[in-house]
């Protein structure tokens, strides 16, 4: 495959010219793209492929993870520097994040790209968009901020931040339109994940797991700030669960960037989980699984695609939790539940995220085929809502970006400055 960062040239040595501060070749339009975490890296990689299919001369620069780098992007700095979540958790990282923001702004000013795409991670990306508001560069934000869930008042800060907002969820365009903002639904990337191509027998053979041993997927998160909070709880949960399910086989799918952290945290566990970092091995694990315990987030939709019955949990700093509860406006945190409009999967959050309660809930799910089948029926209902009108989500997003790229620059100045230093 030709590198995407070298305007379609097969000569990968050209990639070296895209390092920060290097001149950008003028034979292709430049798209500067930033992803701030593992899920954004996946979205960004698919978007790069879709954009390149529509215009092979495009040049890419910006910030991304392993998947985007595998397509030729030379990340300005490690994407993992941005993977921080939580109101309290982010405080120790503020100085470093400000430095990374400055580096991103300076790189955009130097390269003068034709368009900037920011993916999710609103704590960082929206500040970046605001910093370049007077640059005359077209801006797309991909994955709408979930202000419909909490802190709705932030909507008043959005006008002028982007030229186009791309949404993953079908109800979002109407929600934003009611508040005077245009948004476009492009479908959810989970539909392109390939989860359903998993092979259960292959996974059991590769990892020497007996056919009669139940496989339990554990998903503690994709951020270094999340994993240390959930893995100790998961370990104690397993200790309790093994009393009634002694042959349970735990599997932890995790992004490569987080794998060392996970391995360090589980090194003293009495039963070592299988660590899965390869995407195909992850899908095989889903196919082999009888259940899952996952943090809230996109992982719930991935598991739904894989037809894996699940329990959703999460735990953050108590101060963060207290503040969040005052601002959250939706009845559920699991996307599966939110889209279904009812509790399809159990949510065990904060004070309910205890080893005892999690073990009891997972145990019931493993022992009750009817409950598992009921979840699977609801998964099909939810996933049907996530398809774009035409093509794949990445194709739909790429078409929106290409349409904007071909439009003449026409942006009204913003009325007020937002996002203080």
Image (cartoon, rainbow, N blue to C red):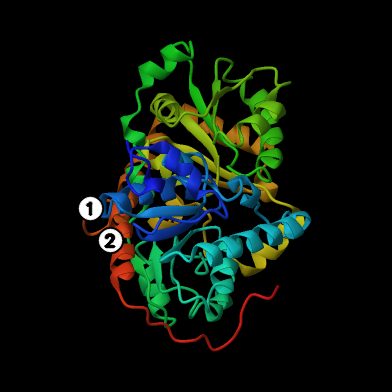
Report x, y in % for residue 222: 58, 42
State whether residue 378 appears in this view.
no
- CB-based contact (under 8 Å), mark 1 and mark 2: yes
Compared with residue 98, is residue 287 higher up or lower down, i.e. above or below?
above
Number of numbered callouts drawn: 2
Q: Along the polypeptide, which appears first: circle 1 or circle 2?
A: 1
Instruction: Report the front residue among 47 and 134.
Output: 134
Report x, y in % for residue 140: 42, 66
**Residue drawn at 61 percent across, 79 percent down:** 418
Q: Residue 391 carries which label?
A: 1
Instruction: Report the front residue among 247 and 111.
Output: 111
**Residue drawn at 39 percent across, 41 percent down:** 304
Compared with residue 230, is residue 245 higher up or lower down, i.e. above or below?
above
Q: In the figure, residue 21 lies in which quadrant?
A: bottom right
In the rendered image, the residue lying farthest to the bottom is 415
Compared with residue 48, is residue 242 higher up or lower down, i.e. above or below?
above
User: Is label 1 or label 2 in front?
Assistant: 2
State whether residue 255 appears in this view.
yes
| Quadrant (top left, top right, bottom left, bottom right) of the C terminus | bottom right
The residue that disc 2 covers is 399
Q: What element carries label 2?
A: helix
In the rendered image, the residue lying farthest to the left is 390
Query: What is the distance, in whole Å, between disc 1 and disc 2 at their CAs?
Result: 10 Å
Report x, y in % for residue 373: 36, 36
In this image, 101 relative to 338: left or right? right
Q: What element carries label 1?
A: loop
In the rendered image, the residue lying farthest to the right is 92
């Amino acid at each position: 495959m030709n590198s995407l960062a070298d305007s379609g040239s097969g000569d990968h040595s050209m990639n070296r010219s895209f390092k920060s501060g290097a001149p950008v070749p003028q034979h292709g339009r430049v798209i500067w793209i930033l992803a701030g975490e593992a899920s954004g890296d996946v979205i960004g990689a698919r978007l790069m492929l879709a954009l390149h299919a529509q215009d092979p001369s495009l040049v890419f620069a910006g910030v991304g993870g392993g998947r985007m780098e595998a397509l030729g992007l030379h990340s300005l700095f490690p994407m993992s520097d941005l993977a921080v979540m939580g109101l309290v958790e982010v405080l120790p990282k503020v100085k470093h994040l400000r430095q990374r923001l400055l580096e991103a702004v300076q790189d955009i000013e130097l390269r003068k790209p034709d368009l900037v795409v920011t993916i999710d991670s609103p704590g960082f990306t929206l500040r970046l968009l605001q910093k370049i508001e007077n640059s005359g560069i077209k801006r797309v934000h991909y994955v709408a901020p979930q202000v419909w869930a909490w802190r709705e008042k932030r909507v008043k800060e959005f006008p002028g931040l982007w030229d186009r907002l791309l949404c993953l969820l079908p109800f979002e365009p109407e929600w934003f339109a009611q508040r005077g903002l245009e948004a476009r639904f492009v479908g959810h990337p989970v539909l392109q994940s390939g989860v359903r191509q998993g092979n259960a027998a292959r996974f059991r053979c590769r990892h020497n797991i007996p056919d009669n041993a139940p496989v339990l997927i554990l998903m503690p998160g994709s951020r270094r700030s999340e994993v240390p909070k959930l893995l100790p709880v998961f370990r104690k949960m397993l200790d309790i669960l093994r009393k009634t399910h002694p042959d349970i086989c735990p599997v932890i799918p995790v992004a490569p960037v987080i794998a060392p952290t996970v391995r360090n945290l589980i090194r003293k566990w009495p039963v070592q989980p299988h660590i899965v970092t390869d995407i195909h091995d992850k899908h095989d694990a889903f196919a082999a699984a009888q259940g899952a315990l996952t943090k809230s987030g996109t992982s719930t939709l991935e598991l739904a695609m894989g037809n894996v019955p699940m329990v959703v949990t999460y735990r953050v700093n108590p101060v963060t939790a207290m503040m969040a509860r005052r601002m959250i406006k939706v009845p559920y945190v699991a996307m599966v539940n939110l889209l279904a409009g009812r509790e399809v999967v159990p949510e065990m959050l904060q004070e309910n995220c205890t080893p005892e309660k999690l073990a009891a809930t997972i145990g019931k799910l493993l022992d009750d085929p009817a409950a598992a089948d009921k979840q699977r029926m609801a998964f099909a209902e939810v996933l049907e809502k996530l398809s774009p009108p035409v093509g794949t989500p990445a194709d739909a997003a790429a078409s929106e970006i290409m349409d904007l790229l071909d439009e003449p620059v026409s942006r009204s100045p913003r009325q007020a400055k937002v996002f203080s230093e």
